[in-house]
Amino acid sequence: MKTRTPLVMANWKQHGSEAALTDWLTSVSAMDLPKMCRVLCVPLPYLAKLRQHRAELQSQVQAGSQLVSAFCGGAYTGEVSAAMLSEFQVAYTLVGHSERRQWLDETASARRSQLNALWQAGITPVLCVGETALEHQQGQTFEVLLRQLSEVLDGQTAGSLVLAYEPVFAIGSGKPLSAQSAQHIHQQLRLMLGRWYSAADCQRIRILYGGSVNKQNAGEYLRQDDIDGVLVGSGSLQAGGFNALCHTVAQAVTPLAPA
Ligand code: PGA
């Protein structure tokens, strides 16, 4: 039986509004799911509102950020440091999401510095890795994943981590990787982590699947031995859909009572 607490992360990307946040958090916080960790990654301007509502609602939903500066502070116009995020009680921050790698030219060196900044601030990075459709078709998945891990973890004193496996072609496409294929890759990823983490840590690190996860398929992922949660984009925007998804996950991870 898995001992890792399931983690369901909502990634709003560049969506939402203050009003939407109020409605979403009110609805999602009303659902009591004590054995699961739920995180909402909002656009940065909404972090203050999220902190305020979480307190008012005594919400179990934790605060997440979609980005962090590679710099710890100083004259870097527009950047937001890890220390600032922690003032808003951010517990998790995405690092290296494929959209930032693809459209915003985020480099491996920036990702390394982001990890460090987050570790220093006591925030858990959610490191995103994943191959493109072409790399997948050419059988390069494991090579690519190992490279993506190595370029950010080699030579670092690695700290707390969540890993998110997101095949690029599955993101926002409505074409998720099957739970069985994802399990096979997650198993290999856990083995790869052994290069930087102790055996005990490798068992503790949660590996999420992301890419077209919805309320219909979420449970199937969580039933796999090495899939410890899901990172959800479009399926997280509506509170009703997200609640249904979390409910499915809760059912999938609750062991059946002995007959
Ligand atoms: P999606 O996005 O659920 O809309 O495919 C996932 C992600 O980008 O994290």
Image (cartoon, rainbow, N blue to C red):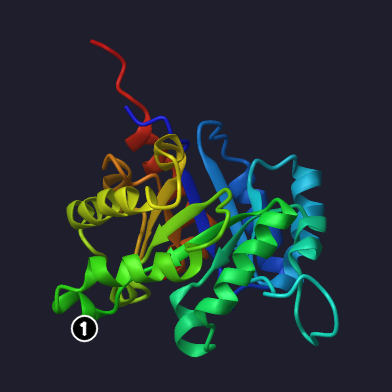
In the picture of the structure, the residue carrying the numbered disc 1 is 134
Residue 226 in sight in this render? yes
Query: On the rendering, which quadrant does ligand 1 occupy?
Result: bottom left
Rendered-image quadrant of the C terminus: top left
Q: Residue at x 47, y 63 (%)?
A: 154
Residue at 49% from the left image edge and 68% from the top image edge: 152
Pick the front one: 106 or 218: 106
Q: Is residue 60 left or right of residue 71?
A: left
Quick one: which residue is furthest to the left in this view? 138
Characterize the local packing of mark 1: few (<14), some (14-19) or many (20 or more) Cα atoms within 10 angstroms.
few
- Relative to 31, is 245 on the left or the right? left
Q: Residue furthest right?
A: 74
Q: Secondary structure at mark 1?
A: helix
Q: Could you say where residue 95 lies in the image, as x and y percent from the top left?
A: 55, 68
Residue 209, by quadrant, is bottom left
The answer to which of 25 and 187 lies nearer the viewer is 187
Task: Name the amino acid type tagged 1.
Answer: Leu
- Is any atom of residue 6 visible in this view? no
Residue at coordinates 56% horizontally, 31% vertically from top-left? 34
At 46% from the left edge and 39% from the top edge, which residue is drawn? 201
On screen, 132 above or below 231? below
Q: Is residue 86 above or below residue 76?
A: above
Q: Looking at the image, how many numbered discs can be counted on the residues?
A: 1
Decide: is 258 above or below 131. Answer: above
The percent position of residue 109, horizontal first and vertical second, equals 55, 78
- Lateral position of residue 224 relative to residue 195, left or right: left
| Quadrant of image for the N terminus | top left
Of 208 and 71, which appears nearest the observer? 71
Residue placed furthest toward the front: 155
Horizontal and vertical percent for residue 62?
A: 65, 49
